[in-house]
Amino acid sequence: MTPAQLEFVFDAKTTATPPPRRDAEFEAFCAKKLAALECGVFPVKVVWSGRMKTTAGSASWRAGVITLNVAIRVRGPAEVETTLLHELAHLLAHRRAGGKRIPPHGSAWRDACKDLGIAGEKRCHNLPFERRRLERKFFYTCPNCATTLARVRPLRRKYACSACCKNFNRGRYDERFRFQPVKKT
Ligand SMILES: [Zn+2]
Ligand SMILES: [Zn+2]
């Protein structure tokens, strides 16, 4: 246990009521999600852990256990639910594959995510705040010279390619060289 480290990310509201070690409410939630699918309900145990450091959640196919990091609670219920469904998708994908070895974040997992209502879910298991801080997921390109820009957060203001503005507009902002978002393929 590393309680000192976890206290660092908690705020008063989330520390007020520590989660149960085993979360019956979430287990019922998982059962309800599975009941809506053709594969039917299978037993899923959901537990909270205070030992995980940078991992938001994990799933053990053999044991049918989903483990969630208590630190994700600080991100709010929506993020917690997404993490839970991400892990449930792992169990669902394995179930559908009949226990065969499958790529952890391959097409079976992605299909399971879609069926559980989290289509387009990221493969990352790291804590959301870590991911936000580190991963550049917004890409832009200059329409003139094709210079690319990778950003952690989306551009909010107009932002043009400085090289092109310098070369063709005396260093002043020019709409022709404004960075355009690139769709991820
Ligand atoms: Zn995963
Ligand atoms: Zn340019």
Image: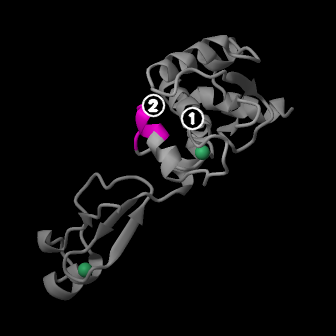
* Few, some or many residues within 10 Å of mark 1 (<14, 14–19, 20+): many
154 shown above or below 13: below
| Rendered location of residue 63, percent (x, y) | 76, 31
Mark 1 near ligand 1 (CB under 8 Å)?
no
> Is residue 68 one of those drawn in magenta?
no
100 shown above or below 47: below
In the image, taking residue 31 as reference, residue 78 lies left or right, namely left
The disc label shown at residue 92, or none: 1
Task: Point out the stretch of residues depicted in magenta.
Answer: 112-119
In this view of the protein, which residue sits in the foreground, 33 or 132?
A: 33
How did the renderer colour the structure?
Answer: one colour
**Element at badge 1?**
helix
Question: What residue is disc 2 on?
Answer: 116
- Seen at 61% across and 26% down, the residue is 73
| Rendered location of residue 139, percent (x, y) | 35, 64
Instruction: Compute the Cα span from label 2 to label 1.
Output: 9 Å
| Rendered location of residue 103, percent (x, y) | 60, 54
